Image (spheres, rainbow, N blue to C red):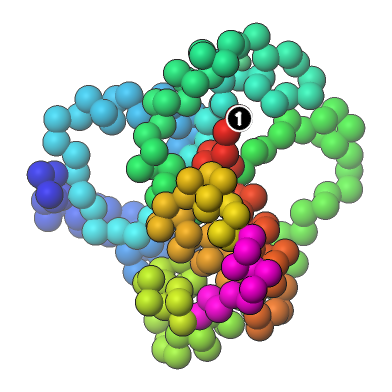
Amino acid sequence: MNGSFPNSGQYKRWFQTCQQAPFGAFSGRAAFFLDGLLRFLIPWGRQPKPAFWPVKPLCRMATQLCPCGYFGSDSRRCKCTPGQIERYLSKISGPLVDRIDIHIDVPAISFSKLRSKSSQLDSAAMREDVVRARDVQRKRFGNDKPMTNARMSHKQVRQFCELDQACEMLLKQAMTEFGLSARAHDKICKVARTIADLSNSENIRPEHIGEAISYRRLDRKL
Ligand SMILES: [Zn+2]
């Protein structure tokens, strides 16, 4: 690696920040949200010497799919040409896309939903689901470490993500159609395993694989 490691002062400040964060107890975990991904990529690319930090981050990133920002919108018409869109999206490198676990479309919120007083999202119920799925994973990996499906090695993917014939067919079709990499293959299996855990299902079923494939949005042609 050509990058620089943080010095002791930087590391201390980073560690203190982690301890103060709500999930700091998960030793060296951190969460980031990069809104407007393409704005970040350009300055990063000009950095002569990237820094490497001893952290396994949960990183969320967001970007528009075209220069005008309305590609796929129901409310406004996108004025970009296919060439403009292709050039715009080519700023996101394939290796970066390949390393992202889940990429999805987030549609604009309609006026009626914005004004609605009833919320479909119940944070407490969602938290219960996550805690239950974490419990399943703790039992699966047989230790008290915060090991998750996302951290599975290729060998563990083969061990814990058994697929029946229907699942195999779906995955094979997606790999061929979208030209997916071995890394994307493992990511689909891991996400499908987590969807199955959230559904209280011991086995990965075709609907779990199908949903995991649908989360490879940037691997598909627009
Ligand atoms: Zn556009």
- Can residue 25 be seen in this snapshot? no
Relative image position of residue 64 (x, y in whole percent): 56, 26
Q: Secondary structure at mark 1?
A: loop
**Residue at x 58%, y 60% (from the top left corner):** 171
Disc 1 residue type? Leu
Task: Give the total of numbered labels.
Answer: 1
- Can residue 101 be seen in this snapshot? yes
Relative image position of residue 99 (x, y in whole percent): 40, 50
Residue sitting nearer the eye, 5 or 94: 94
Q: Residue 169 lies in magenta, yes or no?
A: yes
Residue 10 vertical placement versus 106 (above, below): below
Residue sitting nearer the eye, 13 or 6: 6
**Residue at x 68%, y 69% (from the top left corner):** 166
Which span is picked out in magenta? Answer: 160-170
The answer to whether 206 appears left or right of 46 in the picture is: right
Q: Dot 1: few (<14), some (14–19), or many (≥20) neighbours within 10 Å?
A: few
Q: Residue 113 appears in which quarter of the rendering?
A: top right
Relative image position of residue 131 (x, y in whole percent): 61, 75
Residue on which disc 1 sits: 222
The answer to whether 171 appears left or right of 87 in the picture is: right
**Residue at x 30%, y 58% (from the top left corner):** 55
Residue sitting nearer the eye, 112 or 46: 46
**Residue at x 38%, y 62% (from the top left corner):** 29
Q: Main secondary structure of the magenta part?
A: helix
Q: Residue 16 lies in magenta, yes or no?
A: no
Please identify the quadrant where the C terminus is shown: top right
